[in-house]
Amino acid sequence: MKQGTGKTGLMNARAALVAAGLFVSAMLAAMPTRAADPTMFGVPVKAHKGLFQALKGVNVRALPKTSGARIGKLKAGTRVQVVARSKDRNWLVIMQGSKPKGFVYAPMMMPLVDGELADEVSGSVDLADLADLADVGHCKYRLEFEDRSPIEGQPFQVLDYAADVVCGATAGGAGGLKFPLQLFMTETPYQFSPSRRIYQINVDLREDFHAKEDPLTVIFLFNQDKGRVTLDTVTIADYRRPRKPAPWRPATAAGQALMAALEMALESWNDAAWKDIVKAAGS
């Protein structure tokens, strides 16, 4: 006898369908819902915070379109905080004091890294796990902001930093290999690209602290949108430790990026570099 062909079978089938529907409804209710995009001035926007500078005089508008009412204007060189951008990325929401003011056209604005450190930062890196650097061991450093240097022909600047490094010191801080580093970070994106918040960081060891004629420079790219710092180049090939893929570390703010760059720079020097640094430090 076939099952489900009589009245009882129909009732059982309906009950099963109802139960299945209730199960699906419960599952849908339990699933996380995607948060709605925030709105500003009645327009959906995406969070996008940072410091920007007007490349030219640019209008501030009530809506993210050229037909939007003009409610103000930024002069060339004006620096403002941005809190959001339109979903098409063409417009930025700028702040006036503690409140959003309106929209400006994004291609007319250059993102800047907020790179001044209010206080000295410090950290350490362990090099003993690199077999040929066991004698160098543990390095500690202190890093501070120094000044700004103008870029010739540009309304922007380079941020200058100084670091003191001590490697292989005893627990009490005595002895050890000591040397200074200079760090530089461009406040504007790499290659002056307004659409990509990627900033260059250089870590320099002066030529009088090693055996080559030129400074030993390690170049990094700080991608603020992706939240990472990636090693790009070691300028003296004889001192470069081969590492693939290129090392990177997470960082979202300038202080984090500088610390990551300094630590990866120390890790990028090979045994030949460290031997020459030790020799130069003892001469």
Image (cartoon, grey):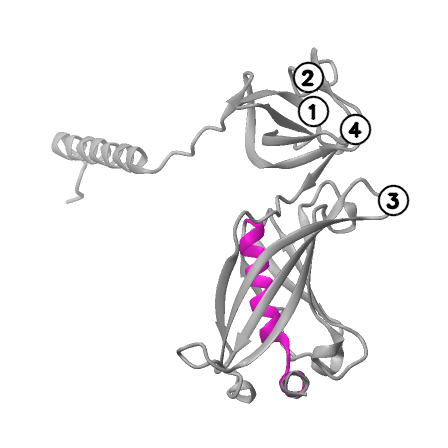
Crowding at mark 3 (Cα within 10 Å: few <14, some 14-19, many 20+): few
Q: Position of residue 271 (x, y in %)?
A: 63, 86
The residue that mark 4 highlights is: 76
Mark 1–mark 4 Cα distance, whole angstroms, equals: 13 Å
Residue 87, placed above or below residue 114: above
x 48%, y 80%: residue: 169
Magenta segment, which residues? 253-275
26 relative position to 83: left or right? left
Mark 3–mark 2 Cα distance, whole angstroms, equals: 30 Å
Q: Hey, which quadrant is residue 25 in on the image?
A: top left
Q: Which element carries disc 1, helix, strand or loop?
A: strand
Mark 2–mark 1 Cα distance, whole angstroms, equals: 6 Å
Frontmost residue, 217 versus 83 = 217
Q: Is residue 273 magenta?
A: yes
Mark 4–mark 3 Cα distance, whole angstroms, equals: 15 Å
The residue that mark 3 highlights is: 153
Res 61 label: 2
Q: Position of residue 177 (x, y in %)?
A: 56, 81
User: In the rendered structure, which amino acid carries the disc numbered 4?
Assistant: Ala
User: In the rendered structure, which amino acid carries the disc numbered 3?
Assistant: Gly
Q: Which element carries disc 2, helix, strand or loop?
A: strand
For marks 3 and 2 on the same chain, the one whose residue lies earlier in the sequence? 2
x 58%, y 77%: residue: 178
User: In the rendered structure, which amino acid carries the disc numbered 1?
Assistant: Val
Q: Position of residue 176 (x, y in %)?
A: 52, 82
Q: Hey, which quadrant is residue 133 in on the image?
A: bottom right
